């Protein structure tokens, strides 16, 4: 059984899409084993997006992710990392097919509704970054 982290980003929160996003994962049979609403700070975001630190969009990305509280969740299931990424669609919402979360609810590369872990190593690091052990069930 595998685990992954998803974050409902500020555009998803502002459009009140958190429940609709979680419903898609529930309907796919994925189990919620951790979930909380948090205001992310600059330190945790610099850590989370360290692999993008040299990209031109990095300052905008960090400031965007701090613009309002977000919902951070852990989902569990067989092959959950790939399944969640398939349900989300590609990073650029404009390229995402209808029927995917980003294709139906996103706008572009930045306002793309959710973040999802991209590998087992990232998922482990993100679980530790965003959750205390007692917040995971
Ligand atoms: P996320 O899954 O949170 O991981 C890195 C984020 O960087 C990605 O989603 C996008 O929101 C953002 N991103 C990637 N490419 C661009 C880009 N060209 N312009 C703005 N944001 C981007």
Image (cartoon, helix red, strand yellow):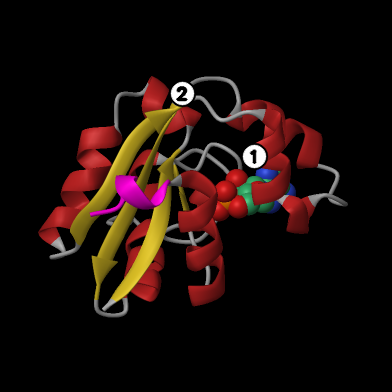
* Magenta extent: 132-137
Residue 84 place in picture, x, y as percent: 34, 64
Check disc 1 and report the residue beneath it. Answer: 44
Viewer-closest of 40 and 133:
133
Q: Secondary structure at mark 2?
A: loop
Answer with the quarter of the image where residue 66 lies: top right
Q: Nearer the viewer, mark 2 or mark 1?
A: 1
Q: Seen from this angle, which residue lies furthest front?
A: 134
> Residue 52: which disc?
none
Q: From the viewer's perspective, is residue 61 above or below residue 123? A: above
Cα distance between the residues tagged 2 and 1: 13 Å
Viewer-closest of 7 and 42:
42
In-image side of 118 versus 58 (left or right): left
Viewer-closest of 63 and 44:
44
- Dot 1 alpha-carbon crowd within 10 angstroms: few under 14, some 14 to 19, many 20 or more: few
Residue 124 place in picture, x, y as percent: 49, 66
Q: Quadrant of the N terminus?
A: bottom left
- Dot 2 alpha-carbon crowd within 10 angstroms: few under 14, some 14 to 19, many 20 or more: some
Check disc 2 and report the residue beneath it. Answer: 69
In-image side of 7 versus 126 (left or right): left
Which circle's residue, 2 or 1, is located before the other in the chain? 1
57 magenta-colored: no
Q: From the viewer's perspective, is residue 96 above or below residue 119? A: above
């Amino acid at each position: 059984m595998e685990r992954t982290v998803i974050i409902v980003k500020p555009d998803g929160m502002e459009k009140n899409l958190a429940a609709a996003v979680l419903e898609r994962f529930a309907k796919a049979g994925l189990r919620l084993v951790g979930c909380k609403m948090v205001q992310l700070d600059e330190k945790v975001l610099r850590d989370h997006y360290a692999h993008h630190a040299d990209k031109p969009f990095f300052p905008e990305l960090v400031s965007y992710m701090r613009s309002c509280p977000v919902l951070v969740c852990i989902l569990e299931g067989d092959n959950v990392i790939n399944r969640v990424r398939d349900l989300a669609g590609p990073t650029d919402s404009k390229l995402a097919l209808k029927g995917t979360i980003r294709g139906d609810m996103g706008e572009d590369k930045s306002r793309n509704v959710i973040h999802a872990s991209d590998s087992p190593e990232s998922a482990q690091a993100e679980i530790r970054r965003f959750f205390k052990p007692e917040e995971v069930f």
